[in-house]
Image: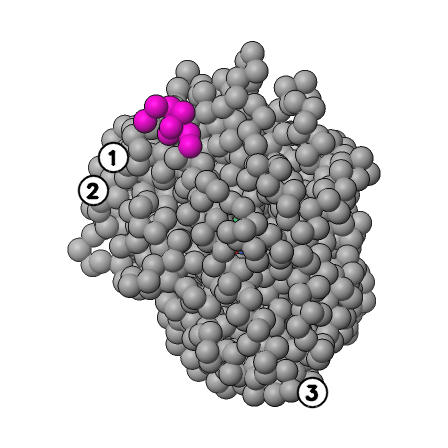
Amino acid sequence: MKPEIAAQLEGYQDMLQLAQAAEILGEDFRTEKGAVATYLERLHPARLSLRVSRIRTETPSTKTFRMVPVDGVLPPFQAGQYVSLHVEIDGIRTNRPLSIASPPTQSGYYDLTVKRVPGGLVSNYLLDNLQAGDRLVSSGPDGCFVYNPLLHGNRLVFIAGGSGITPFMSMIRETCDRGLDRQITLIYGNRSEDDVIYHAALTGLAEAHPNFTYVPVIEKPGPGYTGETGFMTGELMERVTGDLSGAMVYLCGPSAMYDFCLGELQARQVLARRIRREMFGPPVHVSQCPGWPADISEDQSFAVSIVGGPVVTARAGTPLLTTFEQAGLAPPSQCRSGECSLCRTRVLKGRVFQPAGVPLRQSDREQGYVHCCVSYPLEDLEVLIEAKG
Amino acid sequence: MEHYDAVVIGAGNAGLTAGAALAQGDAKVLVLERHNIPGGCATSFCRGRFEFEVALHQLSGVGTPEKPGPLRMTLDQLGVMDQLDFMPMSDLYHVIIPGKLDILLEPDRARATATLQRHFPAEADNIEAFIDLVYKVFGEVIGAFYFKDPEVHPDKYPLYFQYGLKPLQAVLDQHFRDPLLKTALTPYWTYMGLPPSRLSFIDMAAMLFAYIEFLPYHLKGGSQALSNALASRIVACGGKVRYSCPVEKILVENGRVAGVRTADGETIQTGQVVSNASKIATYIDMLEPDQVPEAVWGEMKRTSIGPSAFTLYLGLDQPPEALGISSSTNFILGHTDADAVYDQMKNLEIDHRDGMMMTCYTLIDPGFSPPGTSQVALITLKFGDAWLQVPPAQYAAEKYRLADAMLQKAEEVFPGLRDHIEEMEIATPITHMRYLDTPRGAIYGFEKHIKDSPVFLPNRAHIDGLFLAGGWAGPNGFQPTLEAGFKTGRAVLRRLGK
Ligand SMILES: Cc1cc2nc3c(=O)[nH]c(=O)nc-3n(C[C@H](O)[C@H](O)[C@H](O)COP(=O)(O)OP(=O)(O)OC[C@H]3O[C@@H](n4cnc5c(N)ncnc54)[C@H](O)[C@@H]3O)c2cc1C
Ligand code: FES
């Protein structure tokens, strides 16, 4: 509309004056330069620069790496969250999510506890190579496996298996350090007594804090062991917690533990909303997941043709993300458990296996998008990778 | 070095329709998005067994195949209609002030009028007159602007010239006495972020007209389905979309756009850039001060940054009926003073002064949450400023504290809600700032006060080859931004001679 016509709008002069006044009195947004990035850097930095300040051997297969910031301060986090540690091993760039084991009350460092996974790439590398003084980059803290004060109440049952103790360690220490009104029972399963991480610390905390109960469970104990043995059954849970109803149950550990414990909890009518579980990495043996086709072995390999890139060979039992990393073409990733959706990749042709319960957006599923950190090829594939790691 | 006919910064609504228009028009186009998924606001996320819609409450301008609205026509031209499953909503809205007001309107002119008249019999004629004015004024707007009449003139469009710059409040006061009635007619002001005293009557008329005539819609799979369909259309037409790829700089040579540089240091050559990022980020962060004409700063000084929002996304382990939720779109207010609500938007606290909207998606699409459950979003507008003063170490605790306050409000209308929450995610202005990269987490771009109308501030290009499209460069909301991107894409095609 031409100005002389617009000027005939009722109230035009008044509004024009208002606009002109604002042009003199209004805010100069040039002062906003970098403002968003600066604030977010304090709260949700995308990357952290960390240095190993101290290494502590926890068990024959486990060490704790104390990480301090190279410069600046560490961002706050909620007990139960993780960072994803970036490494480059033999030219392959990859990362691994590690729960922060230290409490959020400790803002000077993050303790990352790493357990050796037989044949595992990163755990072995970290345990065998990392020295005090080494520098590493990680993601900022992230994850939803946290206490919700509005919903979870004050009776908490933590069920941990193996390295799954780490997020609980942070929650337990926070509760004890700050004297929070939470009644915690930790049931912690391990194969042998040698595998129990933080045993002394947990025993000490339980002695000093009446609101924290520690129940180690050993699957195959040595002679002379007197504690709980076998699996973490519902019977055991009920016996040591008194009553499961009204409690909030948290699970963190290997996928086989989930399959077993979730069944036990469901059999005792524990409601879905009273159970939280951490997505703790891809299954160790995907072919043992329900729904895996019987006629395909993990060692079978398939040709994956990447649009605009090479054709790579992919092992059925290896997550596609790992295959892409080996080819140097991986999308960014962080949780490696199917949860954060960062590694979203489109499968144009061919079938992939995705374990049940991995969250995927409805419209992504319809278009063939998968979270490639928990997707396994079941035949030759054609994939479109639209992000660079 | 890579070269493209056009580069689109940001895969929000406008970036996607711009990209699709360009790709479809045979331009070699690249869309760069900093997040790992297309959509911007138009997205969803998963928690447990739930998928949560982030931003879409009611899609306007769709209409039916027989009586298509402008958005349906745009999406049709972009070739994505066959991929989308639109679901009309049976409610226009349900407006509630506990103990004082409880009205459910349907998206039908006659029925909505009758319902209002039943509740406010003394003002039956005024209601008729107001609705009539809404339709007449908007009819003129369509004739003058939608059909691009070259001769817009007061004699031809008298109502437009009389009401075009009037505050909504003035028109309400002229028609009605009962403050409850004024409230019942105008809860949609929250879709614009400005109370009736600051919002133009025309903007409200446009919303009421668009929702009543073309029905409010939702779509299967939520707004992510639309974003995915558009992104996939770009790729199918030979364009490229790259995710997790923020643009850091727009490169300018001799006053013309020459390319962009991404955060990982890659330079991409192009003569045409469409920025769907905020106007502030585009001019202030992506360009050097000496590349920006002085006029831009004046233009931006005229406006102010609009609100962000505090949102609770809830996955409940009961179906809506069991929780007493019977309508999909609910505005829950504490009183009739919209100006007080607007003032309260600057406050961190959430209490009886706030207005709140509650959308229950399961009532629109039972398939959008698992059987026997419901998905609900509770949202109240909040400016980001107060949140930016929360020290990072206090942030999580503040989030929970205010979520608690929000739940208390919701439970006044839906008692027992809290006992059925299986999944909960809390989004603050900081969350929006993180995912959209907008200053102060603003979700509606700049404020659209009457003085900021295109009459005084047209969306002009200031740098040769740089186009802005989206909620910061024009009207906000799904329909406007989707249409704006499409138009911008076509304008770029014309420049490219395609
Ligand atoms: C909670 C909420 C509720 C809403 N409710 C409704 C509703 O019910 N109805 C309605 O019509 N509207 C609603 N809206 C508004 C609507 O979602 C927006 O108006 C619309 O989506 C804005 O589209 P846009 O094109 O401006 O892009 P945006 O959604 O702002 O997207 C811009 C994109 O650009 C990307 N970007 C930014 N900077 C860069 C960079 N440097 N490099 C690369 N990429 C970049 C961002 O990541 C983002 O993806 C709501 C919004 C929110 C958040
Ligand atoms: S890395 Fe998080 S979903 Fe794959």
In the picture, the disc for residue B99 is 3
Disc 2 residue crowd, few under 14, some 14–19, many 20+, Cα 10 Å? some
Callout 2 and callout 1 share a chain: yes
Chain of the residue where label 3 is placed in the rendered structure: B
Q: CA distance from mark 1 to mark 3?
A: 63 Å
Mark 3 and ligand 1: say if the CB distance to the nearest ligand atom is below 8 Å: no
User: Could you say where residue A32 lies in the image, as x and y percent from the top left?
Assistant: 73, 35
Q: Nearer the viewer, residue B449 or A61?
A: B449
Mark 2 and ligand 2: say if the CB distance to the nearest ligand atom is below 8 Å: no
Q: Bounds of the magenta span? A: B491-498
Eyeballing the image, is B328 above or below B261?
below
Q: CA distance from mark 3 to mark 2?
A: 63 Å
Eyeballing the image, is A155 above or below A169?
below
In the picture, the disc for residue A305 is 1
Eyeballing the image, is B68 above or below A27?
below
Residue A217 in sight = no
